[in-house]
Amino acid sequence: MIDLIGLAVPFAYLGILGGSLATFFSLYKKRKAAKSTSLEPWFGPHVQRNIYLSLLHLEPQPGQEKATPVPDSILKAALLQRATEDIRRILAIKATKPPLSQLLSRGSVGDELWQRLLRAEKEMEAELRDVVEEANALATNWGQTIFQSAHEMVQNEIVREKVAEIQAKGKSDREWWDKERASIQSKFMRELDGAKPAETSKGAASGGVNSDEDAVLVEGGGPSGSRSGSRGGTGKKKKSKK
Amino acid sequence: MDETFTLLPLHLDPTSKAITSPNDTTLTPHLSTLHTLHRTLLSLPSQIPPPPFPTNPKRSAQIQKMRDQGNASFKPKATAHPAQAQAHEAIKLYTYGLEMALGRPSWEPSQLVREEASALFANRAQAYMAVKMWAEGAADAETSVELKRGPGNAKAWWRRGKCLVEMGRWEEAGEWVRQAVEVEGEEKELVELGKEIEAHFRQVER
């Protein structure tokens, strides 16, 4: 009798300890799971993916029995668009990951941000597999090349944007230069009466240090402007107006 | 998450096959890019873009032809100074070439676009310089450099520097040439242009 009561105490202790640990652990896990699902997604809504899937599930128009089937070519275009957006996202993840991991190890950012990125990465993996499957369904073996094409499309877009940007800057530069040249010219005209020797000597110095290779270009432009300031200025305008 | 998506209010016109979204105007830009992509895909045999490699050499050959023609009209052997008209003709040819290079279908290798366009922009910059259109020359040279970073484009670097000098933008030119030497190394032309700019600043200080 005494033995049984004496044994019950440690068993009860162990039971309470184990039970409380188990409940704590399960609660902790549940909370963590809830937290990770409630994490804000890294990227906004994937519009191109939504468009593609919406086209697949196009609902019939009011007054129609069946929805008009979407032509394959449109689906292909939509899938390609979806793939380009995927590439953009993958590039974004790749660019963010190393600096973010550094910040994380230094403790500058919270773990939550890192978890969000990892989740986005996992989602992208699933998304890529999905797109490859869809591509193979639309055309034989397209899955092997769709992302190559999409990658080039993204890169080409970047190239064209850059070209457009710099060329636009060149246009505004041109307007600035037109005004600048006109003002320089009017200054020269005023100085024409009492030509200052300082102007000519400055021009000659700058024109003097030229290599053989650029001689062709400079002979066309540089010296005429530097030999005598006033004549060069008027000559410039005449030539460019042609 | 993987199996879900947002159903968008899309509408397919049964006859024209155009996709519209009458209720959601935020989708319009996406749908219009989809539409243009669809149009270009329709012209392809299998309606999917061919893999980037190998590339059809036809367009490259045409672009090269434009470049050669431009070079030929720009650099006549008889006269040392390219005449104005010849330079303008060269600019026109280079511009045609550029249209072809930048008009390449978007799924074709972007590296190829970069190389071809970079060379053409560099050439056109030179032609602009010959007719003293410094602003245009500076922009073209900068575009060329931007498209082909890394060593091997010293001429384009030099051309923009020279154009800036010609426009009297010495500070900018100095900064540009300093960068150029960093990227291209001690190229003879660049070093000399740098010296010219330094000489100018010394002159101003005095």
Image: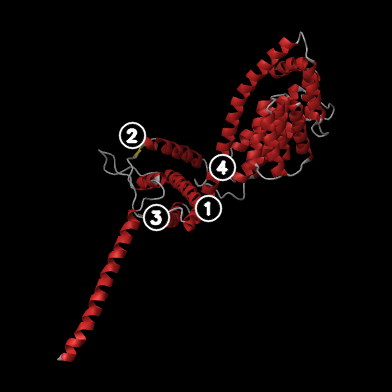
Question: Mark 4 packing: few (<14 Cα in 10 Å), some, or many (20+)?
Answer: many
Q: Are marks 2 and 3 on the same chain?
A: no
Task: Name the residue rendered at 28%, 39% in the picture.
Answer: A61
Q: Quadrant of residue B190?
A: top right
In this figure, which residue is indicated by the disc labeled 3? A112
User: Residue at horizontal 41%, vertical 50%?
Assistant: A42
Relative to the observer, which residue lies in front, B68 or A94? A94
Specify whether residue A155 is in view. yes
Q: Which residue is mark 2?
A: B22
User: Please, which residue is most extreme toward the left here?
Assistant: A1
Q: Which mark is residue A156?
A: 4
Q: Chain of mark 2?
A: B
Q: Is residue B120 above or below residue A35?
A: above
Q: Are labels 3 and 4 on one chain?
A: yes
Which numbered disc, 1 or 4, marks the residue closer to the eye?
A: 4
| Lower sequence index among marks 3 and 1 | 3
Which tag, 3 or 4, sits closer to the chain's start?
3
The mark lying in front, picked from 3 and 4, is 3
Residue type (three-letter) at the residue carrying disc 2:
Pro
Amino acid type of the residue tagged 4 in the rendering: Asn
For the residues beneath circles 2 and 4, the answer to whether they share a chain is no
Q: Establish if B163 lies above or below A3.
A: above
User: Would residue B90 be seen by someone viewing this image from the given angle?
Assistant: no
